[in-house]
Image (spheres, grey):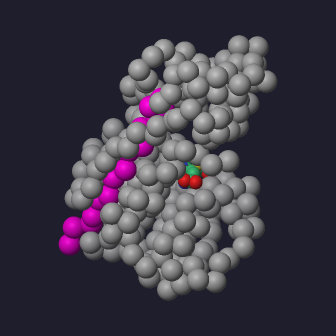
Amino acid sequence: MINPSNAPTSRFLRDAGMEPGMRVLDIGCANGILTRELAQLLGKNGHVHGVDSNEDRLADARSQPAEPEQASITYENVDLSGSLPDWEPFDAIVGRRILMYLPDAAETVRRLTALLKTDGLMIFQEHSATGMPFAAGPIPQHRQAHDWLWRMIAAEDGTITMGLEFPKLLEKAALDIAHYRAEVIMLGSASDQGIEDVANYMVDRVIEAGVADRETIQPDSLTERLVAERQKASPIAWDMAYLICGTKRS
Ligand SMILES: C[S@@+](CC[C@H](N)C(=O)[O-])C[C@H]1O[C@@H](n2cnc3c(N)ncnc32)[C@H](O)[C@@H]1O
């Protein structure tokens, strides 16, 4: 599954000053999609340490083959809501869609800051449900799917406005904001835009969270409904990715 909302990350990592040879911590690495992208960017002299609290996702990440010209990768099971291991300081700490799941993201960012070298980079990508999605014409199917997904996250105690809370979080951790950007994820009319995969993948979670039942969602025709609406109503501004880079003061 390729999540279209991941596209802005690699551009931002480069703009923020990530360089070959760095030692980087990837928080909430899940099955290592971003971890492997970081390893490619950091090259063979770099290192990425991916951490997550879900052992199944870590096992999936560990099962991926290592690439010879890329940075070495290690993984560790860590609960980011508690106290953190005594790691050697990192050149950069990166996280994508992880702060939204933490009970006290500000406290975690504060603890992570202690693990960053002076002038080190704290880089996050998060999203916000606020104001999305929109298009020039009506898009009831996309609005409905968006609403189910974000209500599911809220029902799971996730924060649905995290991208807009970045400045506050970095300020509390005494980090200086070097870059702060929002990028809209646009959907065109082509049938495969990735969001159908995301929506279908989430159906069981939406039901489990009590947001909507199977009868209401009608998963068998979900893809077809979204694709048909996009053919009439695209382009659709589907999601907003917020990206921030903070630096640690001396
Ligand atoms: C949306 S996924 C992250 C995706 C990944 N960063 C990427 O970009 O491919 C969120 C991850 O956060 C992890 N997570 C949630 N709460 C956590 C916690 N308290 N400590 C560590 N990991 C946690 C989940 O296990 C899950 O793998």
Residue 235 in sight here: yes
Count of marks overlaid on the render:
0
- At x 48%, y 29%, the residue is 236
Q: Magenta stretch: give its range.
A: 236-250
Residue 143, position as x, y percentages in the image: 52, 20
- For residue 186, above or below residue 111: above
Q: In the visual, does 247 lie left or right of 135? A: left
- At x 54%, y 84%, the residue is 44
Q: In the visual, does 101 lie left or right of 164? A: right
- For residue 16, above or below residue 141: below
Residue nearest the viewer, comparing 100 with 126: 126
Residue 105, position as x, y percentages in the image: 42, 47
Residue nearest the viewer, comparing 14 with 230: 230
> What secondary structure prevails in the magenta region?
strand
Residue 69, position as x, y percentages in the image: 58, 83
- At x 38%, y 66%, the residue is 14
Q: Quadrant of the C terminus?
A: bottom left
| Quadrant in the rendering for residue 146 | top right
| Magenta-colored stretch includes residue 237 | yes
Residue 226 in sight here: no
Residue 207, position as x, y percentages in the image: 71, 24
| Quadrant in the rendering for residue 183 | top left
